[in-house]
Image (spheres, helix red, strand yellow):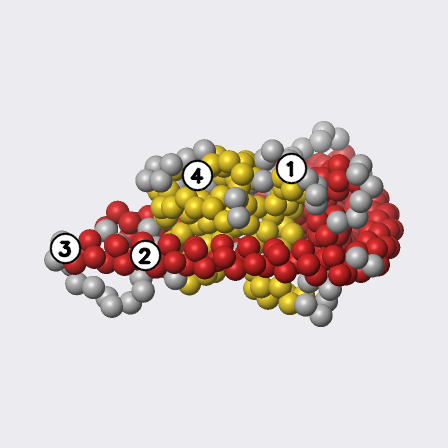
Amino acid sequence: MPFMKVTYRNLPFPAACIVFLLLAALPNLSPAFSQDRKALEADKKKLEQEIAQTSRQLNQTRKKQKTTVAQLQMVNSNIDKRKQLITGLNKEVALTEREIGKLESKISRLGRDVVTLKDEYAKLIAASYRHRNRYSTLMFIFASQNFNQALRRIKYIGQYNDYLRKQVALINEKQIVLESSRKSLVAEKENKQQLVSGQQQEKKKLEQEQREKNRMVAQLKSQEKKLRKKMQDQQKKVNQLNAQIKKLIEEEIRRSQEEARKKGAASSGQATYALTPEEKALSSNFESNKGKLPWPVERGTLSGHFGTHPHPVISSVQVTNNGIDILTERGASARAVFKGEVANIGSVYGLKFVMIRHGAYITVYANLDQVFVKQGQEIDTKEEIGRVYYDSEEDKSELQFQIWKSTTKVDPEDWIAK
């Protein structure tokens, strides 16, 4: 019999119902499953790239065979990302297991429906066989009471034969779908095995990194006195930097308010910028990009978080950070995270910082040994503004990055892209 494309609309009612149920039960991978998997795979790829990048930086510093706090920070960063990676793999395994369950359920249901179709077809064939005498068809037609009934019977016989051909085509089609679904199920099970294997490998790497962290902490603690001295010196520089930044922002605000008063604009009386319409638009644009701003360096590892946290080695000591610290490659350039104007350029203990204004917002790029821009210069997003200082003793290049809204400091991690 010829193979025909079947649609449930042109079948008799019972067969149409069966076809409709079969089409509804097709075990294709759901769009939500595909989207969730793509999102998890994208996160996994990003984390793997970040871990690889941090590992390269770490391997470069190991050449000097000297354990530093910067190395410990990079190891801590990799441990955090490795935990995120394992969590993502766990989610992907759970997602795959759910999809395997759905596929198995649908395949079972589809298999039962194919059996039902075959049984129905077998009954039709058996009935046809019992009336296989070619004269029976003629007798059925000639037994009609009138010409119109004879036409209806001829039409019925044609529909019956057409239905038989479609039933064969439908059975073949559903068997192909069933086989395809079984292959998808096998592929999903293989994917699950690979994910589980990946989980085990990542857990082993995590254990290695945690052992390395413990070794580093023990080694650095043996130099606690030296570390405390360094930390005190560093805190003195940080305090002076923060005081200078705050002072410059306050001066800038006063200046903007004075200019507004000269133009006859009313002052709010608050410690905020008096913004022109253009500056308001720039502020609004900056705010709308919260969570999407580019990093202030092309490649880097987050080494210090915003706020007050225990020191990575001397846990009894609290460290306060007005921004975030980013370890980057030697010779790396700091770059603007958004378009704006260079508001100030300053220095603390011989190291420079650049402040860029974006309406009511200020971004600060500190710990630079060279500056490529001038005060009052218009800056575009990702434009290089200076070179990050390389500390040969610690073997690190680390940028201090801050974001202020008027005189209020905010957490840059909430603003830069994840």
Task: Tell me which label, 4 or 1, sits earlier in the chain.
Answer: 1
Query: On the rendered structure, is 274 left or right of 306?
Result: left
Task: Tell me which label, 4 or 2, sits earlier in the chain.
Answer: 2
| Label of residue 329 in the image | 1
Cβ–Cβ under 8 Å for marks 4 and 1: no
Cβ–Cβ under 8 Å for marks 1 and 2: no
Q: Amino acid at mark 1?
A: Glu
Q: Residue at x 23, y 58 (%)?
A: 257
| Label of residue 262 in the image | 3
Q: Quadrant of residue 397?
A: top right
Q: Residue 351 in the image: state x and y as whole percent.
A: 52, 44
C-alpha separation, residue under disc 4 versus residue under disc 1: 20 Å
- Nearest to viewer (mark 4 / mark 1): 1
Badge 2 marks a residue whose secondary structure is helix
Q: Circle 1: is it few (<14), some (14-19), or many (20+) Cα within 10 Å?
A: many
Cβ–Cβ under 8 Å for marks 4 and 3: no
C-alpha separation, residue under disc 4 versus residue under disc 3: 32 Å
C-alpha separation, residue under disc 3 versus residue under disc 1: 47 Å
Q: Amino acid at mark 3?
A: Lys
Q: Amino acid at mark 4?
A: Thr
- Nearest to viewer (mark 4 / mark 3): 3
Task: Tell me which label, 1 or 2, sits earlier in the chain.
Answer: 2
Q: Residue 45 in the image: state x and y as whole percent.
A: 69, 42
Q: Residue tagged by mark 2?
A: 251
Position of residue 318 relative to residue 142, above or below, is: below
- Nearest to viewer (mark 1 / mark 2): 2
- Nearest to viewer (mark 4 / mark 2): 2
Q: Residue tagged by mark 4?
A: 381
Query: On the rendered structure, is 126 left or right of 260?
Result: right
Residue 185 shows up from this direction: no
C-alpha separation, residue under disc 4 versus residue under disc 2: 25 Å
Nearest the viewer among 155 and 262 is: 262
